[in-house]
Amino acid sequence: MTATVTSEATEPGGAGEASGLRFPDGFVWGAATASYQIEGATTEDGRGPSIWDTFSRTPGKVYAGHTGDVACDHYHRYREDVAMMADLGLAAYRFSVAWPRIRPDGTGPVNTRGLDFYDRLTDELLGKGIEPLVTLYHWDLPQTLQDRGGWANRETALAFAEYAQVMYAKLGDRVQTWTTLNEPWCSAYLGYASGRHAPGITDPVATFRAVHHLLLAHGLAVEALRGAGARTLGITLNPSEVQPLDPSNAADREAARIVDGLNNRIFLDPLVKGAYPEDMRTLMSRFTDLGFIQDGDEKQISQPIDVLGVNFYSPAYVSAKPGAPAAPDAPGTEGIEWRPPVGPVTDMNWQIEPAALTRLLERLQADYGVPLLITENGAAYSDGVHDSRRIEYLDGHLKACLDAISHGVDLRGYFVWSLMDNYEWAEGYAKRFGIVQVDYTTQERMPKDSARWYSDVIRRNGLE
Ligand code: FCB
């Protein structure tokens, strides 16, 4: 088997040698998915309802009322999906566990049939020489916990740490790399500020409570899993690569600083440096008393981690615009305007700018110094199997990774989003990110040109 995320993929003390268009030896190549987006079988084998089951059934919330009830039917087809991964030559696979399969009501009895699914999946992967990388939470919170306040309630953080230990007890003998949360920014700001994602709440007070309790959940789980013997622990964020529209304009620079605070520093500073940034405490205080940040919490959140997962799709440019209302997903951003995308965009209307990924990786390395893993990167296009635009997107972003590595960034691996077309949250099945096409009528999987191309990249550990 090839090197794992855990192993020293790179030269001791820093980034490995990338020569020309080749990646360092041991660079980990994978693909990513998430439970609610692919599994289906939402009422099977004792799974309880999640906030996405509820949200997707709420009229007007998701494109065409699509739900994850069937999705890619991966729950039943995981064997053929793993065989497909092996055919593609993947060294690693990042999947998430559906908490409502494990503890259907969030805190009560453990559902062994749910555990068994991930047990079988893990064995199937290992049997094919594919390293499993587990994400413990990719947005499908048990609905019962939401009924008690969800992430706005501190109890959810404690429940998460318990659930994490249940998973570790089951898979810890075989899974080496564990990440706690996927993109807590989305859980907090899309879930509780703009309400574009489940649970669909629009309340800045709940938003900041959610930020804190998500981070606390991470810290509690890391401590517990470390104590239980876990080797490689981390979290996945979607850090913004945010720039002032006019770098020579002080007001634009200030706008970028605030957005950087809300999207990046409010997560990364407590995670890595053990304290919320002062400016973000001040911003939060405009909305709420900060009594929910209890003594010792920040220390708890800053448990050492071994890897920081980075999900990257698109940069952001902001400017000062007096009188502009705050963005719905960014409380406290009155007077700030986001520039609409410029140049080519994907089907998500996300600007394509690979150089922004290089800048982001370099900044993360410089300011936080944790080994990095791209846990998601990819593009939505409805081009069918001849998806040359996706190849171009991926090629550009992998070159951006090589640039970062050659500038000394300790980047250990890359997971394409996504293995296959799947349920794209509020966009339903309308947006296709897969390197493998899924026919949702027949569930037939058909590798796209990008899948063949990615196989070649993996085989040569580099680009052309
Ligand atoms: C990320 C999510 C992932 C997928 C991609 C396109 O924010 O983590 O589930 O939806 O975006």
Image (cartoon, rainbow, N blue to C red):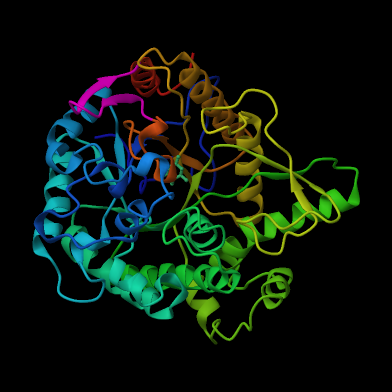
For the residue pair 120 and 3, the one nearer the viewer reads as 120
Which quarter of the picture shows residue 73? top left
Decide if residue 347 is on the left or right side of residue 49. right
Q: Is residue 165 above or below residue 7?
A: below
Q: Which residues are magenta?
A: 434-448
Q: Position of residue 114 (x, y in %)?
A: 14, 58
For the residue pair 456 and 416, the one nearer the viewer reads as 416
Q: Position of residue 238 (x, y in %)?
A: 53, 49
For the residue pair 411 and 85, the one nearer the viewer reads as 85
The residue at 19%/76% (across/down) is: 108
Q: Is residue 161 visible?
A: no
Q: Is residue 438 magenta?
A: yes
Q: Quadrant of the N terminus?
A: top left
Q: Position of residue 21 (x, y in %)?
A: 52, 20
Q: Is residue 351 above or below residue 409?
A: above
Decide if residue 209 is on the left or right side of residue 245. left
Q: Is residue 128 visible?
A: yes
Instruction: Name the quarter showing ligand 1.
Output: top left
Q: Position of residue 198 (x, y in %)?
A: 42, 58
